[in-house]
Amino acid sequence: MDMKDNEGEIAVRMARQAVEAEVKGEKGGRVSAPESFQEKRGVFVTISSHPEHLLRGCIGFPEPIYSLASAILRAAQHACHDPRFEDLQPGELDTNVIEVTILTPPEEIRVADRRDIPGTIVIGRDGLIAELGPYRGLLLPQVPVEWEWDAEEFLGQTCMKAGMTPDMWLDKRTRLYRFGGEIFAEESPRGPVTRKDITHGACR
């Protein structure tokens, strides 16, 4: 995927503008973006408190159903109304940071023996999706790094996110998918944007 650093900065600035407009009840206006932002991509936008790094909202689209530009704007707007939390308020805009994770298309994990699945997962590289009938859960690549999970715990937590028991990744009926992500985030509210490398330590 290889997003350029300046493209990552544009993505975060777009998300910030959309968040602020949504919270203030304003129109977002037009945002200039590279031609590459017309390509369909999966995206998640995360809003966290600063400097505590407490989650305030995280919404996105795992499948590449929208152009990157549209996915960022939609995810940013919805992240302000994450159903797990109260709606984001104008007074919080100065104390929250925005993070954008741009995803690769999910690919199904296929193995002959389900017990071999943990060995196929790379912590810090892979995000996971667990799916069984109406149950579906997703965890981004940075989550197991932040919580210091190994691959087996990551699988269990993804199943729990889907509303299943943590051992359901061993069930052949459960479909598991992996995906990659490039992460760009504000260092401080409205501050510099940097690329996060989560392969060598916690994403904080």
Image (cartoon, grey):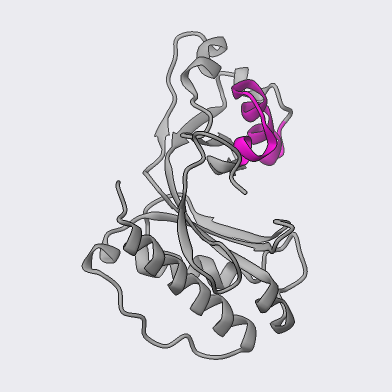
Q: Is residue 183 above or below residue 143?
A: below
Residue 183 seen by the camera: yes
How many numbered marks have been drawn onto this rendered protein structure?
0
Which residue is at the front of the view, 73 or 169?
73
Q: Quadrant of residue 51?
A: bottom right
Q: Position of residue 34 (x, y in %)?
A: 25, 69
Which residue is at the front of the view, 131 or 160?
160
Question: Position of 68 compared to 15: left or right?
Answer: left
Question: Position of 172 compared to 38: left or right?
Answer: right
Question: Position of 102 compared to 90: left or right?
Answer: left
The residue most toward the right is: 86
The answer to if 25 sits in the magenta stretch is no
Residue at coordinates 69% horizontally, 21% vertically from top-left? 167
Residue at coordinates 60% horizontally, 36% vertically from top-left? 145
Residue at coordinates 56% horizontally, 42% vertically from top-left? 142
Q: Position of residue 178 (x, y in %)?
A: 46, 33
Q: Which residues are magenta?
A: 143-164
